[in-house]
Image (tube, rainbow, N blue to C red):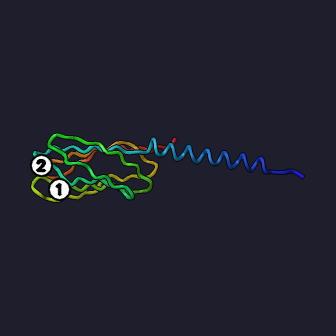
Amino acid sequence: MKTYKPLIAIGLVLGLIALVINLLWVNIFCSVPVAITNQGTGRITNLVLGIRGDTKTLPDLMPGETRTVTLEPKTETQIDLAFVDSSGGAHKESALYLGRHLGGRANVVIDSAGKGTWTHTVKTCLF
């Protein structure tokens, strides 16, 4: 009588290796750095950048300053940006659809009126 235990064990090990490679690949190559630049004349405060399941709070952004935050989408989502400008006006906007297997780079430039202008390069990060 034949036993299939070695074949089953090999199949399980190969499946586990494939899963680990997929998780590492997604975490390494599917991140999206977002550069935020304050092109206005006043300080930006209460700066929050978020996607579904992950929110990052940033320190104040002085005029001419740029900060980069790396987001790692785990599911389909969009980038949400909220901040308060130097006159106390609250701003919130959403931009750029992301998915679990999308990587690339995004930039947002915030002007004196509190308007964000987005540019981005998004690509699939699968083989």
Q: Which residue is drawn at 26% across and 49% down?
A: 58
Whether tag 1 and tag 2 are in contact, CB under 8 A, the answer is: no
Assess disc 2: are there few (<14), some (14-19) or many (≥20) residues with their C-alpha within 10 Å of its C-alpha. Answer: some
Assess disc 1: are there few (<14), some (14-19) or many (≥20) residues with their C-alpha within 10 Å of its C-alpha. Answer: some
Q: Where is residue 95 in the image (x, y as percent from the top left)?
A: 30, 54
Q: Residue at x 33, y 55 (%)?
A: 55
Mark 1 residue type? Val
Q: How far apart are marks 1 and 2 (CA)?
A: 12 Å
The kind of secondary structure element at disc 1 is: strand
In front of the other: label 1 or label 2?
A: 1
The kind of secondary structure element at disc 2 is: loop
Q: How many marks?
A: 2
Numbered mark located on residue 55 in the image:
none
The residue nearer to you, when weighing 75 against 4, is 4
Q: Position of residue 83 (x, y in %)?
A: 21, 55
Tell me the residue that label 2 is attached to: 112
114 lies above or below 29 = below
Q: Where is residue 105 in the image (x, y as percent from the top left)?
A: 34, 42
- Left or right: 32 with respect to 85? right
Q: Position of residue 74 (x, y in %)?
A: 44, 53
Tell me the residue that label 1 is attached to: 84
- Earlier in the chain: of badge 1 and badge 2, it is 1
Mark 2 residue type? Ser
- Left or right: 15 with respect to 5? left
